[in-house]
Image (cartoon, rainbow, N blue to C red):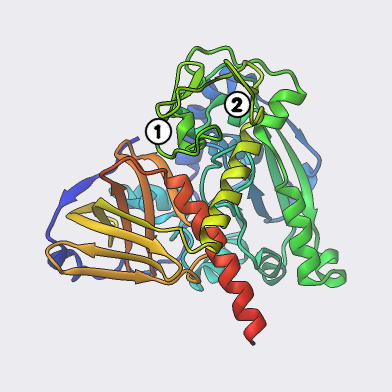
């Protein structure tokens, strides 16, 4: 999928007013039927099945629907589960570029990833109470990197209690094996299923504290795509299954080099020390020679997080790279404004460029995680930062693991948040 891009000087983009907030619209039945029809081939190809334990609740009243996020098939699954019941969808602003009219008639509610959006609560309440539609939300806000839940925002329990509607959880199984983000969105042969369960009821809001509601939601998002594949003996035999694996596994555990790994075919290799690992059909890693440091992708990823934490604690972490800069200011286009420089450290992000016209700073405490993505809209791997006024999409001009930037942002947030609490 591509996005409408327009080249424009930053001086002009900086004067663009943000789009006006508009109330959600009830999903148009024609477009809902069209979406349902268009989803049939993909769901048929994956032999999709669903276990629904709360069909009566869904039919009876509007619900807040939470769902794990693996790929575009998630929307097709949600539509299949709820059809013909109307469903509004909390969507990212970039999805509205060039097609805002269509997105609103589908029932989408725009919001910015990892940016505080106080108006979102009122939009969701309007959809539930006034339009009588359920509201679908992907609280991870982005596709999973390694098959596990990305960091969840705090306050989901508070949100659910404020909306005061049942919370339904849709959990997908096999969707990560079908189409993992790192693999260049290449479809593999895999069976996909989903379970639909009632997560929270109005009685729970009366009986449980906010922290207990949060704990219920956190538990519902404790899944593992690679683990599910192993436990269910799902064989992914495609010859491209390791393509792009370096997007997740960017640091060599044998020599410690970063940015020199390459996933291609069924193997992951280090250009620095020459070591190679095979990604088996069951999702295990096996070294072709010597010790297999990590047989599981998730263990390797967790080790990288620990390495980043160590760099931060020793004062060694830092990012300083040239980038191509794109700005999201309205729904007309994604604006290409030129080159810049992105730095990241304890003080947060700083983006400069466009002949000195651009100088944006973002504190490490501004967000609990980072909008990092792979091959975003077929442009490239991206680091996204920004605020309620504008979003900045930074595409590294040198080989840079955006996964490391996300890990560092999350760890810096946790460290500084803890220090701030101790200082209160």
Taking the image as shown, residue 204 lies to the left or right of residue 261, namely right
Residue at 57% over, 56% down = 310
Instruction: Reply above or below: 209 against 188.
Output: below
Q: How many marks?
A: 2
Instruction: Reply above or below: 43 against 340.
Output: above
Look at the numbered disc 1 and give the secondary structure of its residue. loop
Q: Is residue 202 visible?
A: yes
Residue at 54% over, 33% down = 73
When asked about the image quadrant of residue 244, the answer is top left
Look at the numbered disc 2 and give the secondary structure of its residue. helix
CA–CA distance between discs 1 and 2? 25 Å
- Mark 1 crowd level (few <14, some 14–19, many ≥20, 10 Å Cα): some
Residue placed under numbered mark 1 in the picture = 260
Residue placed under numbered mark 2 in the picture = 177
Taking the image as shown, residue 346 lies to the left or right of residue 359, namely right
- Mark 2 crowd level (few <14, some 14–19, many ≥20, 10 Å Cα): many
Quarter of the image containing the N terminus? Answer: top left
């Amino acid at each position: 999928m591509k996005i409408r891009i327009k080249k424009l000087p930053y001086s002009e983009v900086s004067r663009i007013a943000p789009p006006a907030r508009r109330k959600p619209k009830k999903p148009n039945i024609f477009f809902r039927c069209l979406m349902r029809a268009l989803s049939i081939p993909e769901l048929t190809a994956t032999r999709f099945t669903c276990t629904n334990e709360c069909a009566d609740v869904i039919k009876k009243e509007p619900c807040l629907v939470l769902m794990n996020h693996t790929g575009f098939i998630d929307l097709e699954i949600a539509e299949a589960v709820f059809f013909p019941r109307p469903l509004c969808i909390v969507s990212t602003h970039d999805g509205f570029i060039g097609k805002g009219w269509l997105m609103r008639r589908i029932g989408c509610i725009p919001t910015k990833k990892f940016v505080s959006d106080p108006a979102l609560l009122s939009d969701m309440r309007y959809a539930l109470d006034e339009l009588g539609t359920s509201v679908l939300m992907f609280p991870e806000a982005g596709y999973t990197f390694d098959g596990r839940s990305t960091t969840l925002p705090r306050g989901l329990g508070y949100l659910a209690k404020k909306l005061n509607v049942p919370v339904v959880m849709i959990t997908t199984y096999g969707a990560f094996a079908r189409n993992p983000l790192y693999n260049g969105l290449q479809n593999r042969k895999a069976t996909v299923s989903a379970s639909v369960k009632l997560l929270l009821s109005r009685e729970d809001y009366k009986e449980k504290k906010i922290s207990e509601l949060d704990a219920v939601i956190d538990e519902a998002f404790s899944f593992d795509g690679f683990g599910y594949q192993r436990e269910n003996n799902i064989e992914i035999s495609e010859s491209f299954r390791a393509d792009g694996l370096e997007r997740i596994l960017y640091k060599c555990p044998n020599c410690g080099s970063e940015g020199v790994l390459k996933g291609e075919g069924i193997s992951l290799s280090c250009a620095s020390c020459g070591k190679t690992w095979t990604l088996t059909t069951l999702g295990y890693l096996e070294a072709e020679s010597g010790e297999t440091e990590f047989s599981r992708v998730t263990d390797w990823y967790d080790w990288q997080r620990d390495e980043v934490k160590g760099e931060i604690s020793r004062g060694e972490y830092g990012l300083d790279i040239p980038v191509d800069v794109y700005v999201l200011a309205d729904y007309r286009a994604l604006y290409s404004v030129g080159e810049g420089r992105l730095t990241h450290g304890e003080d947060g992000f700083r983006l400069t460029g466009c002949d000195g016209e651009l100088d944006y700073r973002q504190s490490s405490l501004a967000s609990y995680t980072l909008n990092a993505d792979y091959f975003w809209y077929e442009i490239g791997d991206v680091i996204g930062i920004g605020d309620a006024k504008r979003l900045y999409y930074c595409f590294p001009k040198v080989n840079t693991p955006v996964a490391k930037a996300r890990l560092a942002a999350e760890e810096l947030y946790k460290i500084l948040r803890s220090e701030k609490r101790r200082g209160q």
